[in-house]
Image: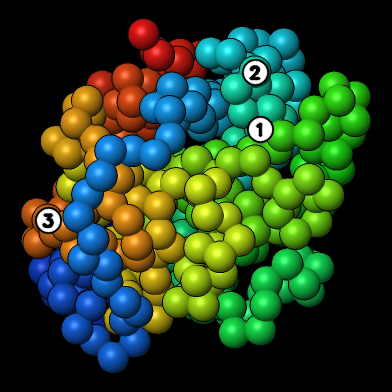
Amino acid sequence: MYLPALLLLFLSSVFALSNNEVLKIAKHDAQMKNAGPSSEQQPQSIPIDWHLLSQAAGMAQQDYCLFQRPGQVVGDAELLYEYGDGNFVQRALIFKSKSLGITVAFEGTEPISPFSQIHDADFRLVNPSKALGGAYPDGVQLFDGFEKAYLAVAKPILAKVREYCDTYKESRVSVTGHSLGAAIALIAAGHYNHVLDQGLHHALVFGLPRTGNGKFANFIDETLKDKFYYVVNGHDLVPHVPPRGFGYQHPSGQIWINPASSTEWKFYPGQENVHGANSVGLLFNTEDHHGTYFHTGLGHGAGAGTCPAQVNTQ
């Protein structure tokens, strides 16, 4: 529940809004002048094997664990490398997964880390850094704090990804993450797809806050179609912030688990689908941010993920 509470506090304090007003913005922001399009397409069966999503959730969960051990097994993946400490620098883990290839899992918000929380709070839209090497075209803007969190780990992690692809003769590269880690993974996805000769294999993320503007969403749709999916659990507040009225827009690719932590999931085509998670009205909560995603626990607190992480694909 830490990231939603933090964002509510930040929005409330910086913009002098009450919690109720923040929630009203999240509900009605599609009517505000800066909001992008809202898809009205009907839900469909998910277009990706749910076992891949379960595997990705397990690797994302391992980021929350204090102790990491090279060679540790998470589902069909072996942990190869750890970078960052979860306090001053967001942790990033690199796995060798049978189903997803060389996979980078980016850590979500750590409630005990002020640096992690600062990344969440710094939500201005900014032009992409030159350090991203032209991965994003003109007009794309990113959540400032999320981009900074990615740039803090980008260079060493990308070097290791290339090293492991060569060592293991693996052409598939995937990314995953939960919460703040989901946003970092999405920015990394666009970067990797640009700089890696083979492009990106999959970006599978969970509890994703809005990460960029409408042109960013369109760019992700154009370049990562059928590669990127983001999962919303029940009435989780996090995917509804920052508000669309502030210029933010989700790409296509939403999979909604509803009710939360259940086996009822559907794919909602297009950007900001009105039949998906945006249909919950004011009934957002913080508890659904952590829970069971495709049979695998993910997040902090009781009923969420375990340490070491376990992937449940039966």
Q: Mark 3: which secondary structure? A: helix
Q: Which tag, 1 or 2, sits closer to the chain's start?
A: 2
Instruction: Using the rendered image of the protein, determine whether residue 116 is visible from the camera's viewpoint.
Output: no
In the visual, does 233 lie left or right of 296?
Answer: left
Quarter-of-image position of residue 126: bottom right
Q: Which tag, 2 or 3, sits closer to the chain's start?
A: 2
Image: 285 above or below 290: below
Mark 3 highlights which residue? 280
Mark 2 highlights which residue? 98
Task: Measuring from the top left, give residue 80's x and y in whole percent.
Answer: 75, 21
Q: Are marks 1 and 3 in contact (CB under 8 Å)?
A: no
Q: Residues within 10 Å of mark 3 (few under 14, many from 20)?
A: some
CA–CA distance between discs 1 and 3?
Answer: 33 Å
Task: Measuring from the top left, give residue 301's x and y in whole percent.
Answer: 31, 27
Residue nearer the viewer, 98 or 282: 98
Q: Nearer the viewer, mark 1 or mark 2?
A: 2
The three-letter code of the residue at mark 3 reads: Val
Residue at image x 16%, y 76%? 28
Task: Measuring from the top left, give residue 167's x and y in whole percent.
Answer: 90, 24
Which of the image's four quarters has the C terminus?
top left
The three-letter code of the residue at mark 2 reads: Lys
Mark 1 highlights which residue? 103
Which of the image's four quarters has the N terminus?
top left
Q: Which mark is residue 49?
A: none
Quarter-of-image position of residue 44: top left
